Image (spheres, rainbow, N blue to C red):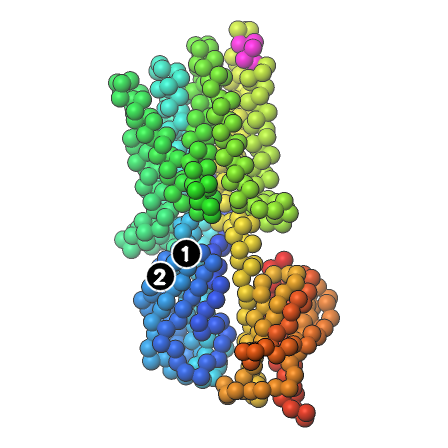
Amino acid sequence: MRALTLVLMLAAWLAPGAAFGHASLVSAEPADGAVIARAPSRIVLTFNEPVSPLSVRLVNPVGETMTLEAAAQGATITVPVAGLGEGTHALSYRVVSTDGHPVAGAVIFSVGRPTGGRPLVAQESDNVLRGLIVTTKILIYLGLFIGIGGRGFAVFVAQAPLPRFAEETITACLIGGIVAAILSIGLQGADALALPVSVLHHGDIWQAGLTTSYGTSAVIALVSMLVLPAPSVDPRFARGRAVAALLGAGLALAASGHAAAAPPQWLTRPSVFIHVICVACWIGSLVPLAMMLHARNGRDALMCFTRVIPYVLGLLIAAGIALAVVQIETIGALWSTAYGTIFILKMVAFAALLALAAYNRLVLTRRIDAANVPRLFSVTIGAEILCVVTILALVALWRFTPPPRALAAESLTPVLVHMHGEKAMSDVVLDPARAGRVTATIAVQSGDFGPLEPKEVALGFANKAAKIEAFTRPAKKQADGRWRVDDVTLPVGGRWTVTTDILIDDFTKVTLDGEIDLRP
């Protein structure tokens, strides 16, 4: 129990609370902020990756809320609606992406005319829930890596009973991992439905957690830890069960998560699978090896471990490089994104881990018969274990942090701003929605949604925060009746003021203002 207490204290101490979203809404029909003449028969939400609906609610102009049914097809969610009255409505949605991450938001639109302010759709964060999610992930990692990896070391390398403290540590990690795997399903359901921890006893919460891809991962992880052989199991059966547990650990983390869900999946899912198994084989060996050397009966186990570990590390590093290239995409993302910052910290800890491992293999292993070397070996392996726990804590942070490849995909999608005046209205679409060279398309109508044929249209841009004064670009009329501004450069991200100047005739000019957010 001392080991279990130590593991729980480390997990709680290292668990953070920051959170970020992942998948994003690409477009909506009606568009966010749109004023439409007739009530729609359906609302269509299109995301940048496949999603499944968890809950969809509509808030009407008088504040009443109704729950709606939604159908998913790939990255598109269709919500049938009927009998919407005049005024401003808010569609609040909560969906889950293919990597198991919940996504929430709202689309505001008006039928006929806007009424009042924008309906309030609260999205409250729950730092307690997030802290518990990260803590359970750390405990699951400890169960998969130190628990399963350590028992695998006992079966394949030591081939003998482990020292008492090593066996206690492995058992503690397995117990913590099993409990965390079960609890994490409910926590995932609460996070998916934006509900607090206090409602964890409701069956719907657990059902929602199981329906996500993370629920599948948690179940596979749970079965993998339960299938492990006990120390007393006949060796003839122990090896098969240990192999099954190691394969299950790889499958568990390859079933969901940012890395596994990233394209191309023929590369990312096998890379995650190999990476996880190699990590378990490496770090799962540290605790029992340290204890065996301290007891001066681990020389043969050390020699076997030393012969095998270079191949394990080679596969681990190759799989890690493949995943890093897919997720990060550009060097600049390392210092411009939260994901990149965590990656750098992880690499620092990993470099320290490799340095300790190299010292153990190249220096201490050659002097293993010296009197004080086994004790020194145990100390350096203890430092390796500290690096491992740090790395696992950093990896758990990625649960809430979108990788640069996801941010890049989101920034490539268009963004729309709707501007409405008494005599005219315009819908301006900027493509892509990030700083740099963009193309603007403008659809113009009369203030009462009728056709309008202006003589000239121009767009103005200004960014107060960046101290960029307003500048104007003329638009060219296209064959489909829309107007277009090609290759306008918006040098920085952030909130931009967009102005549409519409020359209706020689004596009438309408100016409409709106705001739009661009990614860096």
* Rendered residue at 57%/33% (across/down): 349
Q: Position of residue 205 (x, y in %)?
A: 32, 53
Q: Which residue is mark 2?
A: 72
The answer to whether any part of residue 5 appears in the image is no
Q: Position of residue 211 (x, y in %)?
A: 32, 51
* 26 relative to 231, above or below: below
Say which element carries label 2: strand
Q: Furthest residue to the bottom?
A: 507
In which quadrant is the C terminus drawn?
bottom right
- Residue 367 forms part of the magenta stretch: yes
Q: Nearer the viewer, residue 252 or 56?
A: 252
Question: Do residues under tags 1 and 2 come within 8 Å of each other at their CB atoms?
Answer: yes
Q: Furthest residue to the front?
A: 479
* 92 relative to 449, above or below: above
Label 2 amino acid? Ala
* Rendered residue at 41%/56% (across/down): 50
* Rendered residue at 46%/41% (across/down): 268
* 231 horizontally vs 91: left or right: left
- Residue 345 forms part of the magenta stretch: no
Q: Position of residue 293 (x, y in %)?
A: 47, 14
Label 1 amino acid? Pro
* Rendered residue at 49%/17% (across/down): 306
The answer to whether any part of residue 311 appears in the image is yes
Q: Nearer the viewer, residue 53 or 294?
A: 53
- The overriding secondary structure of the stretch rendered in magenta is helix
How far, Cα to Cα, is label 1 from label 2? Answer: 8 Å
Q: Which residue is mark 1?
A: 50
Q: Which residues are magenta?
A: 364-368
Task: For label 1, count other residues whose C-alpha is less than 10 Å away and answer few (under 14), some (14-19) or many (20+).
Answer: some
**Residue 432 image-quadrant placement:** bottom right
